[in-house]
Amino acid sequence: MRIAIMGSGSLGTIIGALITAGGQKVDLIDINKEHVSALNHSGAKITGFMDLCVPVKAMLPHEITGQYDLVFLLTKQVYNQASLEQLLPHLHSTSIVCTLQNGIPEDFVAAYIGHERTIGGVVGFGATWLGPGVSELATETRILKKYAFDIGELDGSITPRLKEVKRILDLVGHCDISSNIMGIKWAKLLMNATFSGMSAALGCCFGKVLASDPAMVSLAYIADETIKVAHAYGIKLERIQGKDMKVLELQDENDISNKMDFYQEVWGPHSNTKASMLQDLEKKRKTEIDFINGFICRKGREAGIKTPYNDLVVKLVKEAEKKGSSPRFTDNIKHFNPNLLSMRKMSFKE
């Protein structure tokens, strides 16, 4: 089986290294020339909760040859069009493309390469790109061994090819097969919109969000908005990392304190994680905010559901993009104030 990772940044470097270490050949494809060079000359180095250096094979997109049987898509959604254009000539009729991206990219990917080639996937761990050839595993290894990936067919069927993809991903960490991958994708979207969204909007790691009462109150509303929008589209959120995200829906504003232990339990092990969107802001790159919190806002508007807290996260991240600098926690936490609650109370009454 010929395998590639399209987009070998923070997560792709770790996934590629561990698949290779497990004895399976895989090509790590990325647009960063220095990164590709470092991977080829010095190997893929993993730091943080793992200390490992693995010799790997990396290449730039124009260096791709032949066709792949399996491709893990890990590019930022903002680059999906360009990535799929580069990838399409290197797919055959039964090639599999497994989306391991943030947000809900499956409809776009399937429309471009074909539904029959597309499998949905979710990554359950965090990573930070430290420099050419080096990626930090920001999630404890015990979590990696239990909840590394979820994959599934878009129509919910359980097929033999899912088991083959699972076999490869199990080399990294435990991979579950789901009959409702979109329910898992929305649960992961909730995880991204809350902690990744707030990490990017406030310019901090997840741990600092967890330690801030104003941030956590706002985060609880972000989760609630996400669940209400999902329900409007008939999406049933699935358990992710063994946890039922549906319990985060709020009955009223007095229900927030009941959710805090859940947040600490689920996200505490990821406290060192810095959102990839914040990493993009630090590098003065365009973020995926339109595909995460922005996606929820857009779907909310279409369904007539107010999303003021997601709206604020989008606004703050886009302001940081325009300025070309990372947000300061002390500056932006002030925006998450009770003035937004008037709109929330209207939503509860409705």
Image: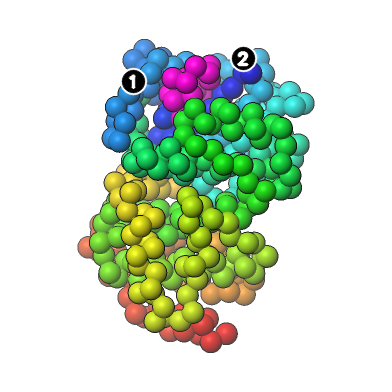
Q: How many angstroms separate mark 2 from mark 1 (CA)?
A: 26 Å
Residue shown at the point (46%, 81%) measured from the top left: 252
Q: Secondary structure at mark 2?
A: loop
Q: Residue 107 vs residue 257: left or right? A: right
Residue type beneath disc 2: Thr
Q: What span is in magenta?
A: 15-32
Residue shown at the point (40%, 43%) measured from the top left: 143
* Residue 282 in the image, given as x and y percentages of width and height: 32, 44
Work out whether 344 lies above or below 234: below
- Residue 144 visible in image: yes
Residue lying furthest left: 330
Residue lying furthest top: 41
Q: Please give the count of numbered marks on the rendered protein.
A: 2
Residue lying furthest bottom: 349
Which quarter of the picture shows residue 295? bottom right
- Residue 327 visible in image: no
Identify the image quadrant of the C terminus. bottom right
* Residue 260 is a magenta residue: no
Work out whether 101 lies above or below 246: above
Residue shown at the point (35%, 57%) measured from the top left: 265
Residue type beneath disc 1: Cys
Q: Which residue is mark 2?
A: 65
Q: Residue 215 vs residue 88: left or right? A: left
Q: Which mark is residue 53?
A: 1
